[in-house]
């Protein structure tokens, strides 16, 4: 479906109504505002696709705004990772902005508010302040410092700014209403003292603005028209508007905060704080571990930008928080990789197959199609010889009529090669099959056009020539969490639901065309699934990550 054909989501309705009411189209502006305290995850992808999608739809600029008001948790590494991930998803921001760029402007506005009697310095402890907040049914109490003179407030705020007071000694609060029904309106804190190094402003500032104070005013500085955030900010909207009222120039665009639902994905957690814990405790190898629901983890796993965009867009924007089954994400990547991933042959659980009537010293290079879904992908040559590997599960000595693979006395086709017939097996002392012997029909080569080659057989198997095969480390992943909603349990911490067995390593045998494959390339291992070359892969040791199986086999035999 094209964007035009899709029905409008409720955010688009809000914008359409604003345009109808006379808001100029060329004043539309959006922003994606991550805090650089972790890597972007699938939840962020929703917000990115929403904001940048609106930018494309309305031909409006979208800023990438780093909400960097908490120096304790923010780092340049995260800024770099966020930029890389947004770009990789395929979006272009208009301006790269930082809330910290507005520290001076915010400070000037705070001074103006003190002068207007709208802000005061409170010298109580945070505990005392919390105690006076009241409850949703009980009004709060005024601070004994609420009626300080403007002069005293200015001089104390100056001391806070210069670092002459300790952390926690004073805060600047907005003077609103300690009896307001909305608890957020009960004189919220605007600034706290923090003697911390900031990743951009270094040691210049000793006071740092709180989210509510910084966010709306940053939107205003950038002249963002629609500031879209997740539902938990709904009660903050009143404060967002109150702060704007204190500083607004009526000739400028007044940003509008609107809220949409958080996106949660099953069998994982989408919260930077929780993902950081997985990294710090060594549950995963890093933010880009292929089991992580981060954009960089998914990239390493073999996900394509289109598959993540389709995932976000196909679910749409909701008004209520929702849990999306991870199988929908897997469906999206399968659908995209089916179109673009080159097909190759690899055997992951090998058993030796000997073609007894094939000459020992012969080798042939057979023609193989790279992608039946894409003619322009062309063909390649795969080597064939007397001794091959096939998958152990593709052979049974005896089987019923529903088993369309290799058995003694039955025929199957070797993909891109010949029709073979099972003859006998060799077993070790424990009765395990070590070799399967078969014969081939030389007139049946795929694509040779002979009558024999047209013969219909029930099954086709993939294989690799043993002498040409290259071994590779194959990393197969299971769900990272054992339950679909690990972070909603009231009694147990999400860490208790970690799947202790989410990574399996095996050695696979690949056709030699994969020798020069490079990190992030993704292939379809025919009849098995999609596999991406890992960043740790090199020519002396190939490493592949299983992206996803060919079918949704979850529950029956895992994937
Ligand atoms: P986290 O809890 O993971 O730290 P956050 O909301 O604090 O998430 P921010 O960096 O502040 O993370 O988020 C940037 C933007 O992405 C915000 O507009 C936020 O609302 C949005 N966002 C974050 N998580 C989700 C989610 N799960 N679903 C939809 N949007 C999200
Ligand atoms: Mg946050």
Image: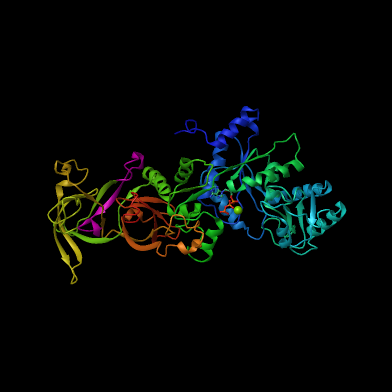
Q: Is residue 437 visible?
A: yes
* 522 left or right, relative to 252: left
Q: Looking at the image, which residue is at 55% across and 34% down?
A: 57
Q: What quarter of the picture does the C terminus occupy?
A: bottom left
- Residue 80 position by quadrant: bottom right
Counting labels gives: 0
Front residue of 452 and 503: 503
Front residue of 520 and 35: 35
* 476 left or right, relative to 11: left
Front residue of 38 and 530: 38
Q: What quarter of the picture does the N terminus occupy?
A: top left
Q: On screen, 435 above or below 262?
A: below
Q: Position of residue 372 (x, y in %)?
A: 31, 42
Q: Is residue 58 visible?
A: no
Q: Residue furthest bottom?
A: 429
- Residue 407 lies within the magenta run: no
Q: Looking at the image, which residue is at 77% across and 63% down?
A: 169
- Residue 388 lies within the magenta run: yes
Q: Position of residue 369 (x, y in %)?
A: 30, 44
Q: Position of residue 68 (x, y in %)?
A: 65, 53
* 162 left or right, relative to 34: right
Magenta range: 369-395
Q: On screen, 482 above or below 366?
A: below
Q: Position of residue 234 (x, y in %)?
A: 62, 45
């Amino acid at each position: 479906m094209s964007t035009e054909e899709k029905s409008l989501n409720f955010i688009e309705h809000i914008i359409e109504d604003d345009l109808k009411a006379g808001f100029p189209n060329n004043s539309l502006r959006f922003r994606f505002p991550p805090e650089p305290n972790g890597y972007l995850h699938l939840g962020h992808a929703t917000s990115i696709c929403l904001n940048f999608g609106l930018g494309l739809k309305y031909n409006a600029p979208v800023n990438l705004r780093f909400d960097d008001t908490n120096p304790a948790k923010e780092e340049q590494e995260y800024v770099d990772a966020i930029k890389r991930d947004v770009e990789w998803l395929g979006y272009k921001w208009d301006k790269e902005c930082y809330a910290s760029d507005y520290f001076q402007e915010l400070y000037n506005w705070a001074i103006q508010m003190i002068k207007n009697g709208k802000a005061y310095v409170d010298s109580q402890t945070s505990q005392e302040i919390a105690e006076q907040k009241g409850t949703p049914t009980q009004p709060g109490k005024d601070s004994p410092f609420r009626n300080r003179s403007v002069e005293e407030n200015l001089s104390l705020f100056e001391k806070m700014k210069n670092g002459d007071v300790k952390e926690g000694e004073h805060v600047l609060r907005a003077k609103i209403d300690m009896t307001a029904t909305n608890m957020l309106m009960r004189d919220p804190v605007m600034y706290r003292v923090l003697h911390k190094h900031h990743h951009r402003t270094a040691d210049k500032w000793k006071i740092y603005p709180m989210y509510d104070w910084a966010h709306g005013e940053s939107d205003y500085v950038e002249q963002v028209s629609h500031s879209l955030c997740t539902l938990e900010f709904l009660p903050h909207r009143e404060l967002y508007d109150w702060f704007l009222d204190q500083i607004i120039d009526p000739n400028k665009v007044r940003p509008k905060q609107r809220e949409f639902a958080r996106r949660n994905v099953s069998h994982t957690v989408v919260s930077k704080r929780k993902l950081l814990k997985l990294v710090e405790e060594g549950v995963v190898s890093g933010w880009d571990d292929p089991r992580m629901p981060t954009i960089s983890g998914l990239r390493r796993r073999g996900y394509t930008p289109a598959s993540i965009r389709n995932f976000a867009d196909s679910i749409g924007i909701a008004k209520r928080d929702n849990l999306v089954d991870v199988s929908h994400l897997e469906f999206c990547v399968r659908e995209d990789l089916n179109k673009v991933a080159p097909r190759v042959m690899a055997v992951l659980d090998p058993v030796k197959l000997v073609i007894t009537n094939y000459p020992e010293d012969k080798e042939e290079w057979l023609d193989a199609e790279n992608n039946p879904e894409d003619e322009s992908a062309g063909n390649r040559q795969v080597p064939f010889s007397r001794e091959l590997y096939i998958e152990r599960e593709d052979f049974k000595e005896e089987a019923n009529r529903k088993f369309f693979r290799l058995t003694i006395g039955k025929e199957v086709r070797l993909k891109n090669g010949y029709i073979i017939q099972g003859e006998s097996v060799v077993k070790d002392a424990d009765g395990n099959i070590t070799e399967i012997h078969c014969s081939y029909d030389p007139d049946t080569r795929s694509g040779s056009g002979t009558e024999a080659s047209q013969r219909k057989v029930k099954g086709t198997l993939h294989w690799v020539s043993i002498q040409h095969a290259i071994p590779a480390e194959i990393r197969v992943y299971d769900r990272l969490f054992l339950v679909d909603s690990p972070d909603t349990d009231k009694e147990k911490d999400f860490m208790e639901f970690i799947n202790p067995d989410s990574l399996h390593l095996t050695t696979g045998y690949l056709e030699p065309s994969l020798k020069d494959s490079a990190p992030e390339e993704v292939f379809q291992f025919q009849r098995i699934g999609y596999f991406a070359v890992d960043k740790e892969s090199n020519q002396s040791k190939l490493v592949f990550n299983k992206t996803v199986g060919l079918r949704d086999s979850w529950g029956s035999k895992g994937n």
